[in-house]
Image: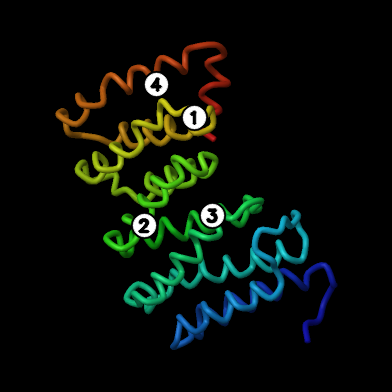
Amino acid sequence: MLSGSDHLVNARVRVIAIELLLQHPPKDLLALVKTLKSNEDRVSTPGTRYFDNSNVHIVKQRICQAFLLMTQLDSFSTDRNTIEYLLEIALVNIEAPSQQLSVRYMYEWILVILAKLKKNVILPRIRECLEKAKTTRLGIVPAYLCILTHQADLDNDSDIEEILEFIAPWCLGQQFMTRLCANSCFKKLFSSLSCPKIQNKYLILSKCINETVDQGDKSKNEEKNSE
């Protein structure tokens, strides 16, 4: 039982859950992930819309928060089976229709962490999903562009160049929000380059993107790019 004011109960429960997970990590992470996924499946129906702050939303949010915390456990980074299982859960949730942004953003965050842990396993799946989204779900493309950008090693020009090859075409994408996201990702990556050869390769595109900031209301354009 928890004592105290009712409005503090939810927050206190979350604090206790975090303490239990981090101070007493489970030996079988995969079993825990499967249990949490099973609990989520019992309260939600795939393809059915749910609303902000509904019970389904809260459950889905708490579960992905638990997944996010698990990625910080020492034993997680060496557990390939759990990483691959969580990868598939994250991809399904990112592409789920009518997904609440608070949930989708946390799964994007999880995928960034997974990519940093097991790049050779995670990146091929992200690229595969991006290629598929190009013809099936353009609206989900910004999520994959952000994941690719945030997982890049900004101190490694080769790593940056590899991701720029995926980002650059989307800077000319058909949808406004996709172009805006791609332009922001491109600027972040390009500004971290130190190799003149790679800089020259993408210099024209960089100049074009910078020129668009000066079109119309510059302050509003810069604000959009920084969001």
User: What's under tag 1, amino acid-wise?
Assistant: Leu
Is residue 202 rendered to the left or right of residue 85?
left
Disc 2 to disc 3, C-alpha distance: 13 Å
Residue at which label 3 appears? 94
Viewer-side residue, 220 vs 16: 220
Q: Quadrant of the N terminus?
A: bottom right
Q: Secondary structure at mark 1?
A: helix
Q: In x, y percent, where is residue 169?
A: 35, 31
Residue at label 2? 125
Which of the two discs, 2 and 3, labels the residue nearer the N terminus? 3
Distance Cα–Cα, label 4 vs label 2: 29 Å
Q: Which residue is mark 4?
A: 209
- Quarter of the image where one finds residue 190: top left
Q: Which mark's residue is nearer the viewer, 3 or 4?
A: 3
* Residue 221 % position (x, y): 53, 21
- List x then y, in percent, for residue 216: 55, 11
Task: Using the numbered discs, state the Cα–Cα distance from disc 1 to disc 4 in whole angstroms.
Answer: 10 Å
Residue under numbered circle 1: 180
Element under label 4?
Answer: helix
